[in-house]
Amino acid sequence: MSEVAVSIEHVSKKFRLYHERNQSIKSAVMRGRRSVHEDFWALKDVGFEVPVGSTFGLIGSNGSGKSTLLKCLAKIYYPETGSITYNGKIAALLEVGSGFHPELSGRENIFLNGSILGMSKKEITAKFDEIVDFSGVEKFIDQPVKNYSSGMYVRLGFSVAINVNPDILVVDEVLAVGDTEFQAKCAQKFRDFKNQGRTVILVSHSMTSVREMCDSAAWLSHGELVKVGPADETIDAYLDSLPGASAA
Amino acid sequence: MRYLKEVLASRELLANLTLREIRGQYKRTIFGQLWSLVNPLASMLVYTLVFAFILRVEPEAGDPSGLDIFAVWLLCGLLPFAFFSNVVQQGMGSILGNVGLVQKVYFARIVLPLSKVGSVGYNWLFEMGVLVVVLVIFGAFVWPWLPLVVVTMVLLAIFAAGIALMLAVANVHFRDTQYFVSIIMQIWMYLTPIIYPISLVAVQSDKYGGLFGTSVTILDVYRINPLERFVAVFRQLLYDNRWPDPQDFLLCAIWALAAFTVGLWIFRRSEKGLAEAL
Ligand SMILES: Nc1ncnc2c1ncn2[C@@H]1O[C@H](COP(=O)(O)OP(=O)(O)OP(=O)(O)O)[C@@H](O)[C@H]1O
Ligand SMILES: [Mg+2]
C-alpha cells in the first residue's frame, strides 16, 4: 500500500443527550447542578486508513455518524478515545458559505471566507480570478451575497474552499444544491485534485457519484464501521443490506 | 506557546472579522459612522441635565488644565466605561452569534470575541478622537498626554477582552449569563465615579470611618473596582492634563494582565468543547 494521508485509529465519539438540560443558571441551581443526560455513542471504535492520492467515500444511512466523523477530522469535535493523524494540510467543507456576511459583497466575502479557511490575503488575491471564474458569478461579485440564489451561494463558497488547495479535502454532502453544470465542474475538480496527488474524503448519498468518483469507501452504520474497501464492493454490500435492495 | 503561535497565525482572520463587523455595522444607514457618537451624546445630555443641572453635582476643576465643564468631565469617564461595557457584552455573545461558523469550520475560536474588541474599539477610537478635539477647543493642553492615553486605552482593551473571554464561555453553557451581565453593567456604572466625583464617596466614607472596627474604610472597598482606576487615569490625563497617579496606573496594568490571563486560561480550557455545547 502507498503512503497514508489520514489514519483514523479506534475513534469513538460520545454525545450527551440531555433530557432536562440546564441552560439557565436558575435550573442549574434548583436541580443542584446536575443535568439529566444519557450518553450516546455516535462513533464506536472506528478505524481505517485513507491512502494518499485517493478519493475516499463515506456512506451510510441518515444518522449513522458520517458528519460526526468528518467533524472529528476537521477538529471541530474532539473524539473521546482514539486518534487521527494527518499527513498534510487539511481543509473541510462541511457547509458552504458558513461565515458569509449577508450585507457584504461577494468580493468582500471571498476575502473573509478565504481567511476563515486559513488563506493569507496574498494567496487570496493571487487566486481571486480563479475563484470568481470557477464560481461563475462574475456579474454579481459586487452585489451583497444576500441577493444571491442558494445555488450561487454554494458555488461561491465551494470555489473559495477548493482554492485553499489543501493536501486533504473533506467534503460533506454540500454539492447537491448546484446545477448539473456545476456538479460536472466539481467532479472535474476532484479528478484534478487526484491527479495532483491530493486526497479527497467525501460523504454522499448518491451512490452513482460515489461509484463514479471514489476508489475506496467506508460504510458506517449506527456509529460502527461495517465495511471498508474498494468502492464498488462497499457500495454493493451497503445496497444489499437495505430492505428492498436493488435500485441504485 | 503553540497556542500563542496559532493565535498569531490567525491575526489576518482577526483583522478580517473585525472589518466585517465594522463594515457590516452601519451599512445602509445615512449617517454611517456618526451613529457611534449618538449613544454617548444622548447619555451625556441626559446625565448633564440630571446630575449637573438638577442635582448640582460639581466635580473639581481640572488641575492644572483649569477646565470646569461637567459634560466634558463626564465624557472622559463615560466613553471608556461604555467601551468596556460594549466589549464585554458583545464579546460574550460572539460565540453564540456565530454558531454556523463554530460548528462548521475549524479556526482559533478566540478570534470571535477578540474581533469584537477590535470593532468596538474602532468606534471608541473615533469617539475619543472627537473628545480630544472638544478638549482642545475648550483650551486643554492634551497633546503631550496622548501617548499615555493610548497606552491606557490598550490596557482597558486587554482588561475588557479578558472579562469577555471568561463570560463568552459561561454564556455558551448558561444562556442567561448575558441578561445578568447587562444588569451588572448598569450597577457597575453607578458604582464607578463616572457621573459623580469620587470626592463625594470620600466624604461619606470619612463619616463612617473604619468598617466593623477595622481600619478598612468604605472608600478602600470602593476602590477595589478596577474601572475606578481606569476612569481616574483617563481623567488625570485628559481632563487634568497631568501625570497619572503611579499607583492607579500600575493597578490598571495589573488588573488588565490578571483578567486577560485568567480569561485566556478559561477560554483555552473550554474551547474544544464549544462546538458541541452550542
Ligand atoms: N452535537 C450533537 N449532540 C448530540 N447528538 C449529536 C450531535 N451531533 C450529532 N449527533 C447525533 O449523532 C448521530 C450521527 O449524526 P451525523 O450527523 O454524524 O449523521 P450522518 O451520518 O451525517 O447523517 P446524514 O446522512 O443524515 O447526514 C445522530 O444520531 C445525531 O443525532
Ligand atoms: Mg450528515
Image: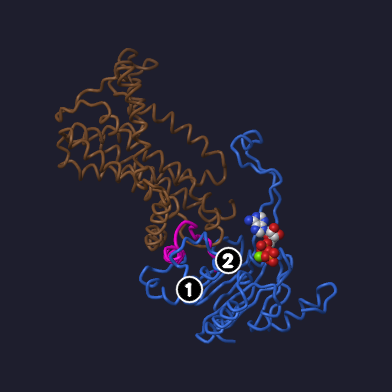
Chain colours: A blue, B brown
Residue displayed at 40% across by 71% down: A124
Residue type of the residue flagged with mark 1: Lys
Residue type of the residue flagged with mark 2: Leu
Is B71 above or below relative to B273? Answer: above
Secondary structure of the residue carrying tag 1 is loop
Residue B204 image point, x, y percent = 33, 15
Q: Which disc, if any, is residue A89?
A: 1
- Mark 2 — on which chain does it sit? A
Q: Residues within 10 Å of mark 2 (few under 14, many from 20)?
A: many
Secondary structure of the residue carrying tag 2 is loop
List the residue tagged with mark 2. Answer: A94
Magenta region: A93-116
The earlier-in-sequence mark between 2 and 1 is 1
Residue B111 image point, x, y percent = 43, 55
Are the residues under marks 2 and 1 on the same chain?
A: yes
Residue A65 seen in this snapshot: no
Foreground mark, 2 or 1, reads 2
Residue toward you, B140 or A193: B140
Residue displayed at 42% across by 45% down: B262
Residue A3 image point, x, y percent = 54, 83
Horizontal relation, residue A224 to residue B72: left or right: right
Instruction: Find out whether residue A106 is within the magenta segment.
Output: yes
Residue displayed at 44% across by 44% down: B164
Q: Quadrant of residue B12?
A: bottom left
Q: Quadrant of residue A82?
A: bottom right
Residue toward you, A152 or B259: A152
